[in-house]
Image: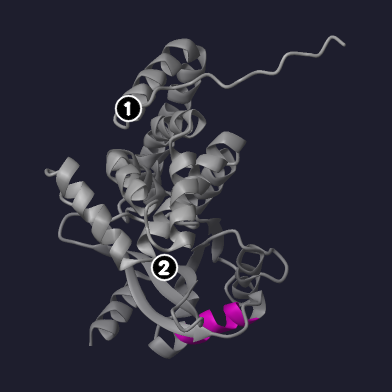
Amino acid sequence: MIQDALVKKINNAKCFEVLVDSTTDISVTEQVSLYARYMTQGDRSYSLREDFLEFFPIKTTTGRNLGNHILNALSSLGVDCSNLCGQGYDGASSMSGCFNGMQAVIKETNPAALYVHCSSHSLNLALMHASNVPAIRNCLGTVKSVIKFLKKSAKRMDIFRRKVKEHLPKVKWNNLKPMCEARWVENHETLIRFAVSYIAIFETLEELKLDSDSNVSSIASQLSKSMTGSSFIISLVTALHLFIYTLTLCKNPQDPNCDLSDALDMVDNIVKTIKGIRKEVDSEFGNIFIKANSLVNLISESIKMPRVALRQKH
């Protein structure tokens, strides 16, 4: 009944956009999620809605197959595809290809269905490329490895929770969030939580270094050494300092009520802010160094300058 009511609203709107995303479930089956974006009229104003319609599995992810499945799914639900005026999804070639992609297949029967690349996915790609700076990339790799190592065992997480309760009694969480390859908005929270619980993570690894399992103690020792290095600390604080500016921007385009002009203004403001950071790089990195030093002081260490090899004269 809910699905029928949504279809009725979509058809009454006389104009709608189809939104599509896919992911692999626990049974390693590709699942496609289908949404519709449309306008509804109230007593005094219009409102923009994004409604989920259904999931369906798919075996072949070619553009032709995806496009046909989407059109068939909409038709089977009773949606009038003649009102389709937009398409929104990521930039994968099977979806965005202008000749054989899903958007091209849908345009064959619905030429008014303009394709728009998902703005959140575009930002995600930009942040992924930004994080490919070697020092930042290595830092994020260490964060990912530490979290994966701790979450792999209930015993290790019990130690971590005990350390959190000991050092951070006021925090409302006692878990670590894994790094996400697809959504950088999730990684912001991961990095913040990692930095806040840094002392708890460090002491957990120190305790695991004494574990009777030689493999566990060896990995704990390696990870402990990696996350206490000056390069890691500086990179972690730098990443937090910069990525915090994009947090709101990551969330904003996913809001059904997102206004294009507001989103563009937000982008301009963030670009200006980052340019300002580059102009005041000495003072900005001075603040980063102070924060990094405060973090490493929690484990009774200090930031150390890297050794620089001099050119040999003989």
Q: Which residue matches tag 2?
A: 16
In front here: 234 or 242?
234
Residue 178, placed above or below residue 313: below
Q: Quarter-wise, where is residue 269 in the image?
A: top left
In front here: 96 or 111?
96
Residue 248, placed above or below residue 121: above
Crowdedness of circle 2 by 10 Å Cα count: few (<14), some, many (20+)?
many
Q: Quarter-wise, where is residue 298 in the image?
A: top left
Q: Which residue matches tag 1?
A: 300
Residue 284, placed above or below residue 31: above
- Looking at the picture, the colour scheme in use is one colour
In this image, 162 relative to 125: left or right?
left
**Position in image of residue 247 (x %, y %):** 37, 41
Q: How many marks?
A: 2
**Residue sitting at 66 percent across and 64 percent down?**
93
Residue 305 included in the magenta stretch of the image? no
**Position in image of residue 240 (x %, y %):** 39, 35
Magenta-drawn segment: 65-73
Rounded to the nearest angstrom, the CA distance separating label 2 from label 1 is 59 Å
**Residue sitting at 22 percent across and 55 percent down?**
161
Q: Point out the tag, 2 or 1, that comes first from the N-terminus.
A: 2
**Position in image of residue 199 (x %, y %):** 29, 39
Quadrant of the image for the N terminus? bottom left
Q: Nearer the viewer, mark 2 or mark 1?
A: 1
Residue 71 included in the magenta stretch of the image? yes
Q: Amino acid at mark 1?
A: Ser
**Position in image of residue 244 (x %, y %):** 37, 35
Q: Amino acid at mark 2?
A: Phe
- Indicate the secondary structure of the residue bearing disc 2: strand
Please identify the dominant SS of the magenta region.
Answer: helix
